[in-house]
Image (spheres, rainbow, N blue to C red):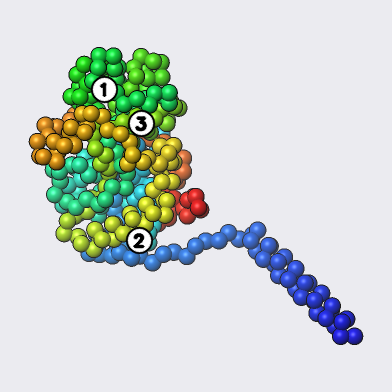
Amino acid sequence: MKRHKTLASCCMAVACMAALLAVLTGCSSQQSYTPPEKAATLSSPTIGKDGTLRVGVNTDNQPLAGQPESSSKIVGIDVDVAAALADSFGLKLEIVDVGSDAESALKEGTVDIVMGIDKSDSSTSFWKSDAYLPTAVALFSTPSNTQVPTNTAETKIAAQVSSKSAWAVTNEFDKAAFSTTNDLKSAFSELESGQVQYVAADAIIGTYAAHSAGYDVHIVALMQQAAGYGVGVSDANTDLKQAVSEALATLTSNGTIDVIETKWLGTALDLSSTPLTAGATKSTDANAAGTTDEPQDEGEGENADDNTAPADDGNADAPADDGTGDEVNAGENAVQPEDIAA
């Protein structure tokens, strides 16, 4: 009799669990989980507009930021990183095109932070975070070529005309055959066809240009010590500087930055072990001694493809906010945790 009662109890328990599973399954198929909104961790006067992080970008600096002809929105690596920052603070995101004048935008209070600031630029007075993207003038070549070039007559190098990379090539490789192109896509086309052995370009912009055009290339060497792009904040805003530093450290350590880089560049760049050319080594020694002759303004920036801005199919169009920028809710534009590989 006791055995029958035990069996009956077990059957009842199984039936209850089956019913509970059916209910849970039905609920999961009808409802999607929406994470709770994160409370804002920053407010005025640390930021100028409660509930919103206003971020300055330079839309002439693709693929960090740009505006595709087919869309009114601003997209790019910097936009995605800014979205992740805003999301970590529990804030909406407002993107403002400040052009190349980040200094004035911060001084006038138009924005709270600016993205894409070259860490090696010593002409700015505002605070710069640690780099979230590494970069340097790099030499690209085909997969079969791993040799770091030297200053010989046989070396053939292409670079975009009037760019910092073109200046670096003529400064170090005065004996090389030098080809100038209007954009990096054309330079990589010359590399692909065998007209040149190397392409000199900013590591970020060059990687994006080659990836977008479908060219199989890799970075052989750096023509300068690797620096990077950081976030600019008014030097007097201690609380915001600390918040940005901590948030960037988290986004770097949890893989978010790598995911964003891979989205735009096809890979997460790591230049820490990339060899330097002979000229870059000398330049590094000269910088340490304070005797470098590198100009502060090396010319125009580089274009991936004749000033074409990057396209982004991962972010919804955002409404304009008072005519000052694009605003989205926190999290709408950011890389989500499920996008990050374990």
Residue 118 locus on image (x, y percent) = 23, 42
Q: Secondary structure at mark 1?
A: loop
Specify the amino acid type for callout 3: Ile
Q: Secondary structure at mark 3?
A: strand
Which residue is the extreme one toward the right? 1
Residue 335 locus on image (x, y percent) = 44, 50
Q: Tell me which label, 3 or 2, sits earlier in the chain.
A: 2
Mark 2 surroundings within 10 Å by alpha-carbon count, few (fewer than 14), some (14 through 19), many (20 or more): many
Residue 138 locus on image (x, y percent) = 30, 31
Mark 2–mark 1 Cα distance, whole angstroms, equals: 48 Å
Specify the amino acid type for callout 1: Thr
- Give the image quarter of residue 23: bottom right
Mark 3–mark 2 Cα distance, whole angstroms, equals: 36 Å
Specify the amino acid type for callout 2: Phe
Q: Quadrant of the N terminus?
A: bottom right
Residue position for label 2:
89
Which disc, if any, is residue 150?
Answer: 1
Residue 155 locus on image (x, y percent) = 29, 17
